[in-house]
Image: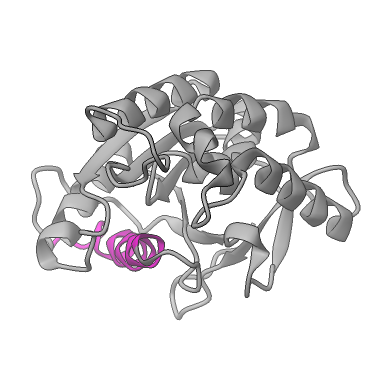
Amino acid sequence: MRLRFDDERTLAVMAHPDDAELLCAGTLARAQAEGAQVGICVMCNGDKGLPAGQHIENPAAARRLEMVEAAKCLKAQLLWFDCADGNLFDTLENRRKLIEIYRQFSPTLVIAHDLCDYHPDHRAASVLAEAATWFCASKGHVTQSPALVSPPALWFADTLNMSGFEPQFFVDVSGQIEVKKQMLGCHRSQLQRGKDGDFAPLMDLMLRQATTRGAQSGVVAAEAFRTHQAFKRTRAW
C-alpha cells in the first residue's frame, strides 16, 4: 500500500517556527507534489528561543521572518496563532481561535505534535490541535466561519530525537530531504543554538532522524506518524 495525498488539504499545527521542518516538512512537500494544498499553523512566536550570549532586538519578529522564508520554499500557506512561548494552554479562548483557523483553511488532514514530546508548548499544541479537529465540525461551537462538514483526520508526528515514540506508519520522504534541509536552513537564529547546553544541532538532528526512520522502513529517508485512534476519529486510506 502507498499513501497518496491527491486532493487533500493538509495542515501541520506546530508549536514553534522550525518544528514542521524537523518533523513533517517532507510529508508536506510530498503531499503538495501529489496535488494537496498544504499549510503550516505556527502556534508560538518563538520569542524565547534565543542563542546563548547573543542579543536579538525583536526575537519574535526575527523568527517570523525566518518562518516566512521557510514556508516560501514549500509554497505553503502560513497561519499564525500568535502566542508567546511558554504561554500556550488548553483554554476555551485558544480552542475557539484554532477552530476558526481550521474553518478558514478547511483541512482534510491535520498533523500535530505527539502528546509525549519533550516541550510543554509541543504538548499544549497537541491537546489544542486534537480538540479543535473535533469541534471545528460542530455547529454548536460558534466562530466567525461556518462549521466544517466533517472533522479532519489527525496524525501525530514523531517526537524530537524519536524519544518515546512508537511509529504506526512511515511516509517515504527520500525525494524531499533537500526541501527539509532548505527550509530548516532558513531558521538561522536556531541553527546558531547548536552548541548551547540546553539545545541541539538541529540540522544534524533532523538528518539523523530522517535517515533512521528511513532505515527502519526500508527507504533512504522517512517521517514517522501515528493516527488518532479514538472512537469516530479513525480513517481508512
- Residue in the image at 46% along x and 72% along y: 115
From this view, report whether residue 126 is shown above or below residue 192: below
The front one of 64 and 166 is 64
| Location of residue 88 by image quarter | bottom left
The kind of secondary structure the magenta stretch mainly shows is helix
| Location of residue 150 by image quarter | bottom left
Q: The magenta stretch spans which residues?
A: 121-139
Toward the bottom, the furthest residue is 231
Q: Quadrant of the C terminus?
A: bottom right
The spot of residue 38 in percent (x, y) is 47, 33
The spot of residue 183 in percent (x, y) is 56, 27
Q: Would you say 115 lies left or right of 236 here?
A: left
Q: Quadrant of the N terminus?
A: bottom right
- Residue 152 in view here: yes
- Residue in the image at 72% along x and 62% along y: 169
Q: How is the image coloured?
A: one colour
The spot of residue 211 in percent (x, y) is 81, 48
Toward the front, the furthest residue is 53
From this view, report whether residue 137 is shown above or below residue 20: below
Q: Would you say 52 lies left or right of 93 here?
A: right
The front one of 156 and 143 is 156
The spot of residue 49 in percent (x, y) is 36, 45
Report if residue 21 lies within the magenta region.
no
Q: Would you say 104 lies left or right of 120 here?
A: left
The front one of 200 and 126 is 200
From this view, report whether residue 67 is shown above or below residue 169: above
Report if residue 135 lies within the magenta region.
yes
